[in-house]
Image (cartoon, rainbow, N blue to C red):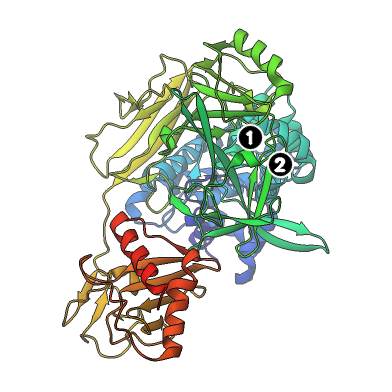
Amino acid sequence: MNYLQWNNLIAKHFFNSDNAGKEVLLYVDKDLIESLGQPFGCGQQDFINALNEGPGWTTHSGFCQKALQTCEDWRARNLEFPPYIAYLACFVLATGEDMEVKESAYYPRLNKLLSLPENLRLASFTKTSGLWDDLERWTKEDKHEELGRFVFGIRGSMIWVGLPRFQTLLSVNERKELPAFFSAANLDPSDPPTQEILLKHLLHYGYRFLRKHTRGILGAKNGDDMIFKEKLLELIMNELEEWDGNAIEQEPGARETNNVQSGLRLCMEIDLIAQQTRFTMRLKTNRQFPEEDLFFNFRESGGVLVCKDSGQGWSKVIRCESNKYFDPLELDWEKGLLLDDPVHRWKARLKAADIRLFISGTNEGLSGWVETQRLERGIPFKLAVASGEYEKIKAWGEKDCVSFRELLVTGMPTGWRLFESDCARASCSGIDVLTVSSSVRLTLRGGIKIRGGNTYLHIVPPVVALENGSEGDVPTVNGRPLIRAGREAHLWSLPVDISANELLRVEVTVAGKKLTKILRLEEPVMAQDYHAPQRDISGRIISGPKGEKNTFSGAVVYVDVAFEMPLDVFIKPSVHRSIFFVGVPGQVCEWPIEKMPEWHPVWAIEKTDKKEWSVIYCRKSLKDSNAVVNGLRDASMIKRWREFVWINRKRTRLPDMPLVRKKWQKYVEAAKNV
């Protein structure tokens, strides 16, 4: 292969849509080069030969001079990837697998790889730092992290050697093992702990997933490795926050299965006048919910808990089969809860705890207070505390919190008390959830992403979160100070007058360290060449001549006569659902198994799961007659009609609209005597 073929092959391996928004380490070893070249009958030596040859436009003879020349005005060449990535890959390849080797051994290794004299010092090697810097700029500013985010970093005291060595901070295999570690440590990506607690889990479980050298960095107490330790924790924290909960688990009999891990959160409403609390439970996930509802086996009662998607990763309040809200007071909070949906292979965990931390749900679009696993500085919070921890928490609250007090309320689990504070000044020793992090992070929260990376919908931008900053630390966007988002001291809003497609650089300097986030806001765009297929009223794609009557294409409907049924009833049911249209007694049609009826339905009854049905009104006006009387005379059809309307009435969820609900109840009551 020639140079550009190798360059693009390596670039595509690291920078692709699967890595959108994730930090990319250019970890290159011999196995990777061999595996990439193997389909083309090429190996490491062919790779080195291509590097020595360089792309067609280079004229310099020196290895590093040739690498630098590939970067000159490369954007004007209309290339898919920066043309110097293969050279950077070679610099990383020279670090070797033994990471404990002295830094001074790097140059002889690089020379040996290039078949050069061992003591030769490559000319212009120190100038190649500009290539690393340009790669970071390309991923963030040119591509907006849509193919991944590269970060310029140095590892060790030797600056130029430290650039390629930094890319070996975490190996490819270690990154692949991180989901297994997250699963083993029961970590929730939608509610991660502080970096201090993450480190605690890494040191406990790390022997199963990390190299000895990596564990050594995580255990560092001083020296240069403290810098790498901080960066390594930041990298793993980013991986955790991007994790979608999917993990491979080893089941009895050595069988591996994929399961989705998600977290359950307690939510609390407080009525200060009545001095009473009320708890509910929701699920939060980084993953898209299945099209169908989740049905979790609740082993404690032998029943089933129903979980419905509410948007933005949150579920609606979890309900029982009877459609009543599930009451978390039925649980033993100190033991926690593990639910599973065997059909979708989802697991949801409420962590065992004798201290539960709650913060305002406003920023999640929820009312009241929401449970969390991380205590941040400057944030009001409430604590539910079991009897065994009263004295310790009271002592900590009085010493290290602002305005710490007990709330005398009812509605708490037996033996539990509720406390509140304006903010915490220090951690509570030995309590993970009350560990106040010392690390400062600049993150983006909320908003609607477009394509991945850091491109957001202009009308729904993210907010900027500065975790553990001080009162005087004010982030800016393109030099303009941000304003606080409501009462939250750590959240900042982007200016409302920022135009679309403008490159936005959010920056803040905390204790001499500059933190940066780059993003862009875009308006929604429909592709010019997008054409939705034409479908019939059953949702089937029409493969024959177009322009037929009573069809639709996307939002465009082609009809001869206006349909009186709501659009909902034309949604094609899934494999597990059916829709039963009912009219006067004896009029029943199971769609799509049976053809749409010629008579006009009054109601559509949809089977949403094994034990629950929903009902949709099909007439134009609520003034239309229910038409229960004067039905057909076919006894078998009347019996079938009565089964769906009267016999199954307790399984049918009532319509949300009061007038429609009342009309359905009258319809059912009239069917009682048919």
Of 506 and 434, the residue lying toward us: 434
Of 279 and 55, the residue lying toward us: 279
Question: Which numbered disc flags the more N-terminal residue, 2 or 1?
Answer: 2
Residue 426 is left or right of residue 641, and the answer is right
Residue 525 is left or right of residue 306, and the answer is left
The answer to whether residue 579 is seen in the rendering is yes
Amino acid type, label 1: Leu
In percent of the image, x 29 and y 69: which residue is there? 567
**Where does the N terminus fall, quadrant-wise?**
bottom right
Residue furthest to the front in view is 673
Residue furthest to the left in view is 560
Of 159 and 560, the residue lying toward us: 560
Mark 1 crowdedness (10 Å alpha carbons): few <14, some 14-19, many ≥20: some
**Residue under label 2:** 185
Residue 90 in the image: above or below residue 38: above
In percent of the image, x 62 and y 38: which residue is there? 329
Secondary element at tag 1 = helix
Secondary element at tag 2 = loop
Q: Quadrant of residue 518?
A: top left
Residue 353 in the image: above or below residue 262: above
In percent of the image, x 42 and y 42: which residue is there? 140
Amino acid type, label 2: Ala
Alpha-carbon span between mark 2 and mark 1: 18 Å
Of 216 and 103, the residue lying toward us: 216
**Residue under label 1:** 232
Residue 456 placement (x, y as % from top left): 35, 45
The answer to whether residue 158 is seen in the rendering is no
**Where does the C terminus fall, quadrant-wise?**
bottom left
* Between marks 2 and 1 in the image, the one whose residue lies nearer the viewer: 2
